[in-house]
């Protein structure tokens, strides 16, 4: 056998062995997820090689919600979780990936507002809240409004009691500009 053929054969054998090991590890990790946590090799394999599952009951416990209410023409509209609506629209049509991104930006602004800005009188003029207001008027409400209110909360699921707890992070109402 000449040198190029021998090299091809060695490469083919290496690929077959690698695929066999990969399939064996994947089957073990998928069929026995709890047992595989005690094995260091399988833990590393699951974390860095095996794709998914991305969301499991054990890992998804807290959801963030941003409720937006607005006053237009002298009347307040009820608060609505537009970000959740965008997520539900994405779930109905997963090929519309942009709907998923529409949810991330306002929640990012709300988290930033909750972490970095001080509550009180100046909250309505903070850059994060002004960006959140502009996004809400442009993407969700579809018009400029007289006043706007935001309620940012988290909902946490307790696995042991099978119940939810709701925590309000901030609530703010900003009047006309």
Image (cartoon, helix red, strand yellow):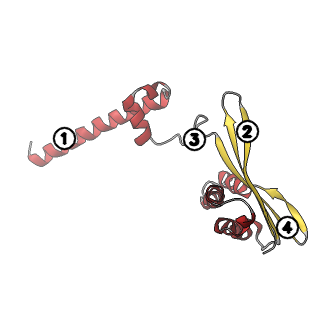
- Circle 4 packing at 10 Å, graded few (<14), some (14-19), many (20+), is some
Q: Is residue 85 visible?
A: yes
Quadrant in the picture for the N terminus: top left
Q: In this view, does 80 lie to the left or right of 56?
A: right
First in sequence, mark 3 or 4: give its number.
3
Q: Mark 4 points at which residue?
A: 71
C-alpha span from label 3 to label 1: 39 Å
C-alpha span from label 3 to label 4: 37 Å
Q: Name the residue under label 3.
A: 55
Q: Mark 2 points at which residue?
A: 165
Residue 83 position, x and y percent, is 70, 56
Name the residue rendered at 38%, 34% in the picture: 23
Of residues 104 and 146, the one nearer the viewer is: 146
For residue 10, which numbered disc appears in the image? 1
**Between tags 3 and 4, which lies in front?**
4
Q: Is mark 1 on a helix, strand or loop?
A: helix
Q: Is residue 28 left or right of residue 21?
A: right
Name the residue rendered at 73%, 44% in the picture: 167
Q: What element carries label 2?
A: strand
Of residues 52 and 177, the one nearer the viewer is: 177
C-alpha span from label 1 to label 4: 72 Å
First in sequence, mark 3 or 1: give its number.
1
């Amino acid at each position: 056998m000449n040198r190029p053929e021998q090299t091809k054969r060695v490469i083919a054998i290496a690929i077959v062995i690698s695929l066999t090991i990969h399939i064996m590890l994947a089957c073990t990790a998928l069929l026995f997820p709890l047992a595989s946590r005690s094995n260091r090799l399988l833990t590393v394999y699951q974390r860095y090689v095996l794709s998914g599952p991305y969301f499991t009951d054990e890992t998804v416990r807290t959801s963030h919600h941003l409720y937006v209410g607005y006053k237009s023409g002298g009347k307040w509209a009820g608060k609505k979780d537009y970000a959740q609506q965008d997520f539900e629209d994405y779930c109905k049509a997963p090929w519309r990936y942009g709907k998923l991104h529409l949810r991330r930006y306002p929640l990012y602004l709300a988290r930033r507002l909750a972490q970095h800005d001080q509550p009180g009188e100046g909250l309505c003029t903070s850059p994060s809240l002004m960006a959140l207001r502009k996004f809400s008027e442009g993407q969700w409400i579809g018009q400029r409004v007289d006043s706007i209110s935001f309620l940012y909360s988290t909902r946490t699921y307790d696995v042991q009691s099978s119940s939810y707890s709701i925590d309000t992070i901030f609530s703010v109402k900003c009047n006309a500009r």
